[in-house]
Image (cartoon, rainbow, N blue to C red):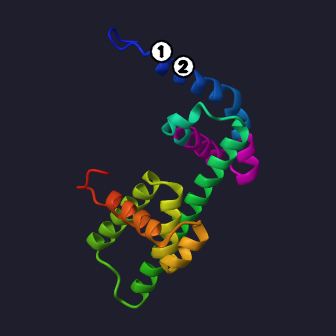
Amino acid sequence: MPKGCALSPAEGDLQQRILTLYSEHHGWLSGWLRRKMGCAHYAADLAHDTFVRIMSARPELAEIREPRAYLTTTAQRLLIDRSRRQAVEDACLTEWALSAAHGSAPSPEEFLQMADTLDMLCRALELVSHKAREAFIQHFLEGEPQAVVAERLGVSTRTVRTYLVDVLIHCNPGSEAA
């Protein structure tokens, strides 16, 4: 470690907990995901993403009582997020293919702009809470009214609106949240 970059005792303790969690459970999580997904490469990617997500939730790391349950829950949420992202991408590609079949295909520049917008949306959804992500997907992508989304998530309609605004703020590259 470079001179002057010593970790505080709390940071050192956190780093040790992360290393312990990783060394004790990474192999197990990778195997579990490999069996679930049927592909070692996707499983390795998702295992990596799971630990990255957990590392970004630092305050919660000290409170993990059942590490394997926590890891599987986190991995399953990431898997659902990936599936939804893939569904959105597939729907866009299908729409673009239909447009091309009817002679109204987007120009390469428009296609690139749409792909960039989709990528930005996916990144924004990764930055918000699970409930905010669910609210956005259910309302804007699945077309559910805010009241239905609120009932499903067990929150008020006002909270759903707050979640939607949070995602939209993260979508704006010029905002402070992005």
Q: Position of residue 170 (x, y in %)?
A: 35, 57
**Residue extent of the magenta highlight:** 30-52
Number of numbered discs: 2
Vertical arrangement, residue 69 with respect to residue 153, above or below: above
Please tell me whether residue 120 belongs to the stretch shown in magenta. Answer: no
- Type of amino acid under label 2: Asp
Would you place residue 11 above or below residue 136 in this image? above
**How far is mark 2 from mark 1, CA to CA?**
6 Å
Residue highlighted by disc 1:
9
Look at the magenta stretch and give its main secondary structure. Answer: helix
The residue depicted at 62 percent of the width and 47 percent of the height is 74
Q: Residues within 10 Å of mark 2 (few under 14, many from 20)?
A: few
Direction from residue 61 to residue 5 in the image, left or right: left
Kind of residue at badge 1:
Pro
Secondary element at image label 1 = helix
Task: Using the rendered view, name the quadrant where residue 158 is placed.
Answer: bottom left
Residue 81, image x and y in percent?
56, 59
The residue beneath circle 2 is: 13
Can you name the residue that lies furthest to the top here?
Answer: 3
Q: Is residue 43 a member of the stretch shown in magenta?
A: yes
**Residue closer to the observer: 67 or 98:** 67
Above or below — where is 129 with respect to 148?
A: above
Mark 2: which secondary structure? helix
Residue 115 drawn at (x, y percent): 37, 66
